[in-house]
């Protein structure tokens, strides 16, 4: 049953019926950790209602254009992760995967305009030949860019071309979204790094969290709609 996972042992971030059957589809290893994403077939069936069985999900993927970040995906086990955009052209609808304040995965419908952008956190930089810089992003994407950016900053990318539209630096009063920890799903304004902790403000209160939990989503306000 390597393609499957016991429902009762599935990540707590998955909002699924854990008693309806024994197994659920296991996502293929990909850019996102299992607890930070969902198999595309499960999203179509359990979240978007486009199928009632996994076999139906497979047919939907084979017979229709289902896009993730602007690229057609046919694999029902393909893992969709944080801020990925799912587009269903036949329905003229798009959705973005996010976390709510219970640290659960939610699939939120978004506008056509917003479906063309995606925030990607810079998690590393690699020096290539001839001094070119490769930026390593949170979703496994790697882009070569001359853009001046630091690890921890966010790139606002166009979809599907992955062009850098804007750099959202981790700086004072930038808008941050919490992607893990007890404050997961929170939105606030970054204040400072203090010793080992990052400080952000919300409702005029300072809150401590781990720096790696911060994801810059805007300067004075978020560039994407965040529903909690």
Image (cartoon, rainbow, N blue to C red):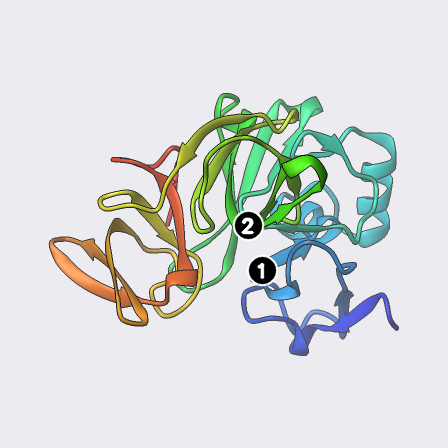
Q: Secondary structure at mark 1?
A: helix
Note whether residue 45 is visible. yes
How many angstroms separate mark 2 from mark 1 (CA)? 7 Å
Give the crowd class for mark 1: few <14, some 14-19, many >=20 residues within 10 Å: many
- Which quadrant, please, contains the N terminus? bottom right
Residue at position x 76%, y 60% in the image = 29
| Residue pointed to by mark 2 | 82
Q: Which residue is at 26% across, 51% downward?
A: 190
Q: How dense is the environment of label 2, judged by Cα within 10 Å: few (below 14), some, or many (20 and up)? A: many
Instruction: Tell me which corner region of the image, top left, top right, bottom left or bottom right, holds residue 35.
Output: bottom right
Q: Quick check: marks 2 and 1 in contact, CB under 8 Å?
A: yes
Residue 219 in the figure: left or right of residue 38: left
Q: Residue at x 45, y 40 (%)?
A: 149
Q: Nearer the viewer, residue 139 or 187?
A: 139
Query: Is residue 189 positioned above or below 102 on the image?
Result: above
Residue at 73% from the left image edge and 55% from the top image edge: 30
Q: Classify residue 103 by image quadrant.
A: bottom left
Q: Residue furthest bottom?
A: 9
For residue 36, which numbered disc appears in the image?
A: 1
Horizontal side of 93 relative to 148 (left or right) equals: right
| Rendered view: 204 above or below 173 | below
Question: Is residue 191 depicted above or below 11 in this figure?
Answer: above
Dot 2: element: loop
Q: Residue furthest left?
A: 204
Residue 112, horizontal then vertical, whole percent: 53, 22
Q: How many marks?
A: 2
Q: Nearer the viewer, residue 30 or 171?
A: 171
- Would you place residue 147 above or below residue 51 in this image? above
Percent coordinates x, y for residue 155 in the rendering: 48, 37
């Amino acid at each position: 049953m390597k393609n499957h996972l016991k429902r009762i042992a599935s990540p707590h971030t998955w909002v699924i019926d854990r008693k309806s059957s024994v197994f659920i589809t296991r996502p293929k290893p990909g850019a996102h950790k299992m607890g930070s994403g969902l198999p595309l077939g499960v999203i179509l069936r359990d979240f978007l209602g486009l199928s009632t069985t996994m076999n139906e999900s497979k047919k939907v993927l084979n017979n229709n254009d289902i896009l993730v970040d602007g690229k057609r995906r046919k694999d029902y086990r393909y893992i969709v992760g944080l801020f990925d955009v799912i587009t269903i052209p036949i329905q003229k609808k798009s959705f973005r995967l996010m976390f709510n304040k219970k640290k659960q995965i939610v699939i939120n419908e978004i506008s056509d305009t917003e479906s063309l952008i995606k925030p990607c956190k810079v998690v590393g930089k690699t020096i290539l030949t001839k001094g070119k810089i490769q930026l390593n992003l949170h979703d496994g994407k790697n882009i070569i860019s001359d853009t001046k950016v630091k690890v921890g900053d966010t790139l606002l990318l166009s979809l599907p071309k992955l062009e850098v539209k804007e750099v959202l630096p981790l700086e004072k009063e930038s808008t941050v979204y919490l992607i893990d920890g007890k404050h997961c799903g929170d939105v606030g304004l970054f204040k400072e790094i203090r010793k080992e902790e990052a400080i952000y403000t919300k409702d005029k209160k300072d809150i401590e969290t781990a720096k790696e939990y911060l994801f810059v989503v805007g300067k004075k306000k978020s560039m994407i709609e965040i529903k909690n």
